[in-house]
Amino acid sequence: MGNSLEESQSAESKADFIHKMNISLKEARETNYWLRLLVATEENLEQRLLPLLDESNQLISIIHTIIKNSKAKN
């Protein structure tokens, strides 16, 4: 996710920015999936992973909002 977010900062166009942000969203959702899987299967890690899962959910929401707002400004 981090690399795509960095790349979006130097996007060549609005469409390129949205594309790169969509990649970041996809990567964030994948990270979220793996965190949920770990929480479900590794009880000894649950307390350490729950804050990361919450942060992951927040990042997904932020990236989604950025994409939605960027598309709305066409």
Image: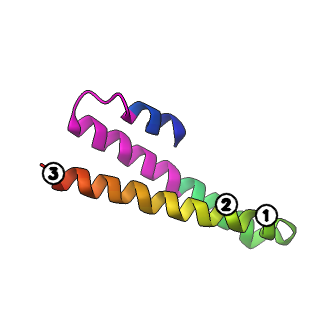
Instruction: Judge by depth and name the residue closer to the eye, 43 or 51.
Output: 51
Q: Which of marks 3 and 2 is nearer the N terminus?
A: 2
Instruction: Judge by depth and name the residue closer to the eye, 61 or 25.
Output: 61
The residue wearing badge 2 is 52
Q: Which of marks 1 and 3 is nearer the N terminus?
A: 1
Q: In this view, does 2 lie to the left or right of 9?
A: right
Quarter of the image where one finds residue 43: bottom right
Q: In the image, what residue occupies the spot 47% across and 59% down?
A: 60
Neighbourhood count class around disc 1 (C-alpha, 10 Å): few under 14, some 14–19, many 20 upward: few
Q: In this view, does 23 lie to the left or right of 17?
A: right
Residue 58 image offset from top left, x and y in percent: 51, 63
Q: What residue type is labelled 3?
A: Lys
Asked if 55 appears above or below 16 in the picture, the reply is below
The residue wearing badge 1 is 48
Q: What residue type is labelled 1?
A: Arg
Q: What residue type is labelled 2?
A: Leu
Neighbourhood count class around disc 3 (C-alpha, 10 Å): few under 14, some 14–19, many 20 upward: few
Q: In the image, what residue occupies the spot 65% across and 67% down?
A: 36
Residue 34 image offset from top left, x and y in percent: 64, 58
The segment highlighted magenta reads: 8-29
Task: Assign a secondary structure to mark 2.
Answer: helix
Task: Assign a secondary structure to mark 1.
Answer: helix
Residue 46 image offset from top left, x and y in percent: 78, 69
Task: Assign a secondary structure to mark 3.
Answer: loop
Residue 73's mark? 3
Q: In the image, what residue occupies the spot 80% across and 70% down?
A: 47
Mark-to-mark CA distance, 3 and 2: 32 Å
Neighbourhood count class around disc 2 (C-alpha, 10 Å): few under 14, some 14–19, many 20 upward: some
Q: In this view, does 58 lie to the left or right of 53?
A: left
